[in-house]
Image (cartoon, rainbow, N blue to C red):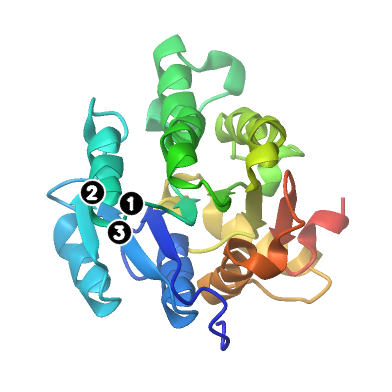
């Protein structure tokens, strides 16, 4: 975790904490340790008891529900940020979803509706966040999202999320090009497999993690603090020349084709 205060005085939005094993939680802790003020969201009333105590631990000044599939909720979050802070320095988008029936079958068998929902939650919501964040970043900023190696190569049982994450990574490149003139950087972070609640929906995930350990040059898995340290760096001014990239934090798995 970051031991510097490279985010002192910065304001950031963290979307995607579900519990203490969430990648977004590792990132939020790193942002807080680096001095940032945070806005933290939870998915719904069911998630709130798990997320709000974590937000309190980080003294998050803004705590709100956010289901990107519900009309108006994303706008409400940004309206609150505008009223309370008047600006935003970074955003972490760490949400993804695909209906189980579409995720667990062949990609070519996925339903139109399932594909559309997966793309909406996992990819288009990041574009929408960028559009809302843009006017709050007159001095520039950093937009971060979470990808996975399955975007670049076929990973057994990753299924529909592979094409969806590939679209997300492509979106990052186009967003970086469009927002670069305003000093807004856009990057994807691609962690190795982590035992999160979201990952539990992937079939035979334990085998996926075991395979990653076998492939990794470092011979181990990564943890949420490894991801958080990278994201805290990317959110800060020291990463001012890094944009449009997918940065792997996976103990080297991605080089072992």
Q: Give the label, 2 or 3, closer to the camera.
A: 2
Q: Which mark is residue 83?
A: 2
Q: Give the label, 3 or 1, closer to the camera.
A: 1
Say if mark 2 contacts mark 3, CB within 8 Å: no
Q: Which residue is identified by label 3?
A: 40
Residue 145's place in the image compared with 111, above or below, is below
Mark 2 residue crowding within 10 angstroms, few (<14) / some (14–19) / many (20+): few
Q: Position of residue 5 (x, y in %)?
A: 53, 83
Q: Is residue 104 visible?
A: no
Q: Quadrant of residue 207?
A: bottom right
Q: Mark 3 to mark 1: distance in Å?
A: 16 Å
Disc 3 or 1, which lies upstream in sequence?
3
Q: SS class of the residue under badge 3?
A: strand
Q: Which mark is residue 105?
A: none
Q: In the image shown, does 153 or 78 lie closer to the viewer? A: 78
Q: In the image shown, does 21 or 93 lie closer to the viewer? A: 93
Q: Position of residue 8 (x, y in %)?
A: 48, 77
Disc 2 or 3, which lies upstream in sequence?
3
Residue 63's place in the image compared with 106, above or below, is below
Q: Quadrant of residue 121?
A: top left
Residue at 72% of width from left, 49% of height from top?
243
Mark 3 residue crowding within 10 angstroms, few (<14) / some (14–19) / many (20+): many
Q: Position of residue 245 (x, y in %)?
A: 74, 47
Q: Which mark is residue 86?
A: 1
């Amino acid at each position: 975790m970051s031991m510097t205060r490279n985010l002192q005085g910065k304001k950031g939005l963290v979307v995607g904490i579900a519990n203490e094993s969430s990648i977004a939680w590792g990132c939020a802790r790193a942002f807080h340790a680096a001095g940032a003020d945070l806005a933290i969201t939870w998915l719904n009333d069911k998630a709130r008891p798990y997320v709000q105590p974590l937000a309190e631990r980080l003294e998050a000044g803004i705590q709100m529900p956010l289901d990107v599939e519900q009309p108006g909720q994303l706008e409400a979050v940004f309206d609150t940020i505008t009223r309370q802070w008047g600006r935003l320095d970074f955003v972490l988008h760490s949400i993804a979803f695909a209906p189980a029936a579409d995720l667990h079958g062949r990609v070519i068998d996925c339903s139109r509706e399932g594909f559309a929902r997966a793309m909406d939650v996992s990819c288009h919501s990041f574009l929408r966040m960028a559009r809302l964040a843009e006017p709050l970043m007159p001095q520039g900023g950093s937009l971060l999202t979470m990808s996975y190696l399955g975007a670049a190569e076929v990973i057994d049982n990753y299924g529909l999320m592979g094409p969806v994450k590939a679209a997300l990574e492509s979106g990052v490149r186009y967003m970086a090009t469009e927002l670069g003139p305003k000093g807004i950087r856009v990057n994807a972070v691609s962690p190795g497999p982590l035992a999160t609640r979201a990952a539990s929906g992937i079939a035979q995930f334990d085998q996926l993690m075991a395979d990653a350990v076998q492939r990794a040059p470092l011979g181990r898995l990564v943890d949420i603090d490894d991801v958080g340290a990278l994201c805290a760096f990317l959110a800060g001014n020291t990463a001012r020349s890094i944009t449009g990239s997918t940065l792997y934090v996976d103990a080297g798995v991605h080089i072992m084709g």
